[in-house]
Amino acid sequence: MLQLKLNAILPNMTKTLQIEVDPSLCASQERIISGELVYKELQQIQADIDPSSSPIRAELTFGKVGKFVVLTGRISANLVLQCAACLELVDLPVDINVKLAIINDEARIGLITDDYEPYLYEGERLLISDVVEAEVVLVIPAIARHDICPIELPKTSTSKGFTLETEKNKNPFEVLEKLKSN
């Protein structure tokens, strides 16, 4: 089993997952890819998470199941999101078990066994960071919230401290009224 050691190739740099690979070649070599994505490298989810989030770590192994290239492994991180209720930061621990069938032909999706989820890519090469981010997108909630917010929130419009800010609507004819009175 061949393990891709990015630190051996790039000794003084972080093991980034911003690499393109040939999935078929990696599967035939049973290649293991491990590394991380830091906030500034994120493309799909950067707007959804806080910069204080930990790097997204992944250890992924290519293999073959029948005629399919498969990618298995783990993705983990501690993401920081903004609570939609109190606007404070909320932690989202991420631990994803990856079992993907890597395909570049949509017609083959129906042939994948139930043990694997399809991952459809275009072209001959696969960008590992795209795969990792696509998996993380699936676990980020549409609306992030604390189980119990750290600050007390108003429950209703009659709660103490609740104020409804309304903009005073201006009469569009007010200017004409001033001209008429002159």
Image: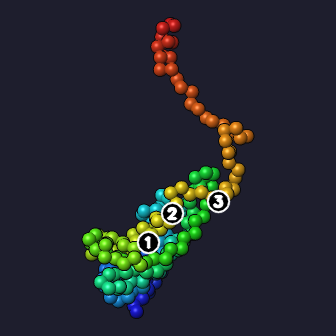
Q: x%, y% of residue 27?
A: 34, 85
Mark 1 residue type? Val
170 or 120: nearer the viewer: 120
Q: x%, y% of residue 12?
A: 47, 80
Q: Mark 3 or 1 closer to N-term?
A: 1
What is the number of the mark on residue 132? 1
Which residue shows up at 56% across the image and 57% down it? 144
Which residue shows up at 39% across the image and 69% down it? 130
Residue that label 3 marks? 147
Residue that label 2 marks? 140
Quadrant location of residue 88? Answer: bottom right
Labels 2 & 1 near each other (Cβ < 8 A): no
Measure how far apart labels 2 and 1 are at the Cα level. 13 Å
Name the side, left or right, on which 64 lies relative to 156: left
Mark 2 residue type? Ile
Which residue shows up at 57% across the image and 27% down it? 168
Mark 3 residue type? Asp
Vertical comparison of 177 with 9: above or below:
above
Q: How many marks can you see?
A: 3
Quick one: SS at disc 1?
Answer: helix
- Could one spot residue 118 in this view of the protein? yes
